[in-house]
Amino acid sequence: MFTPRRALFLGAAAIATTASRKVWAQAAPSGPHTLPALPYAANANEAAIDTMTMEIHHQRHHGAQVAALNNALRDQAEFAALPLDELLQNLSRVPQAIRTAVRNNAGGHANHSMFWEIMGGQGGTPSGEVAEAINRDLGGFDQFRTNFNAAGMGVFGSGWAFVTVTNSGQLAIAQRPGQDNPIMDGLRVLMGNDVWEHAYYLRYQNRRADYLNAWWNVLNWNKINERYAAARAGTLRI
Ligand code: MN3
């Protein structure tokens, strides 16, 4: 039943929403960078990552980094115009006053955008050209998984374990602290795992090793194969 009282309530809600949007727009410009939607439901990675962790991690952690990046790039037309990978490759040219903010938040934006993309799958063993490259460069899948998990365990505090890929298809395991990303060093990322505590603490608490082991169960090897092909074609960006 539509009543004047209901109309008044809706009107107040609309005003409140408009007002909060204005505050948000001032606090964090809506561009040039945007939070990508998850390419699957938030519960798609339950075999390794619980739904609440996925939602908080994506919307709040990654979302805050995108907002902070846009905020840092306010009044920086030259750097605001750069694609994310080019921004990461040109950190030394970014004004010192915003360089740390750009490094942390552009790095985090790239890291998380990659992270969501490579999950949502059924895990299992890799196939196709990636499987061949893993055999050639990383000692086969079992050795790779052992060494990658060790790299994740070896990150002190917050950071990432990655597999880097060159444009000739060469793979290597790498670690980075904080939100640093191998793109900053002229490399490309095939895949990587977030070992910040926010990525796993709700389900695993201090048991990072259990999280690292479970993570393989939700990888999307088709997507990782696509990223490998793109790296070799020179079209892989982040
Ligand atoms: Mn994270």
Image: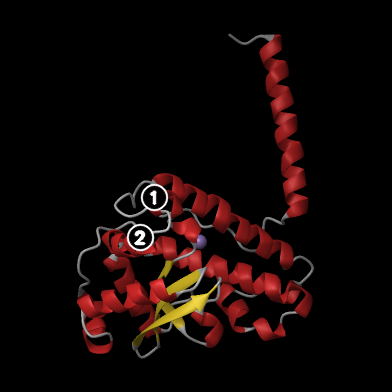
Figure label count = 2
Image quadrant for the N terminus? top right
Name the residue furthest front: 206
Q: Tag 2's secondary structure?
A: helix
- Residue type at mark 1: give it: Arg
**Mark sitting earlier along the chain (1/2):** 1
Question: Does the residue at mark 1 contact the one at mark 2 (Cβ under 8 Å)?
Answer: yes
Color encoding of the figure: secondary structure
Q: Residue 97, how many percent across, how many down?
A: 78, 75
Q: Nearer the viewer, residue 25 or 202?
A: 202
Q: Residue 199, how many percent across, how many down?
A: 46, 58
The answer to whether residue 13 is above or below residue 38 is above
Q: Nearer the viewer, residue 201 or 123?
A: 201
Q: Ligand 1: does it lie within 8 Å of the C-beta at label 1?
A: no
Quick check: can you spot residue 163? yes
Residue 215 figure quarter: bottom left
Q: Nearer the viewer, residue 62 or 160?
A: 160
Which numbered tag is attached to residue 203? Answer: 1
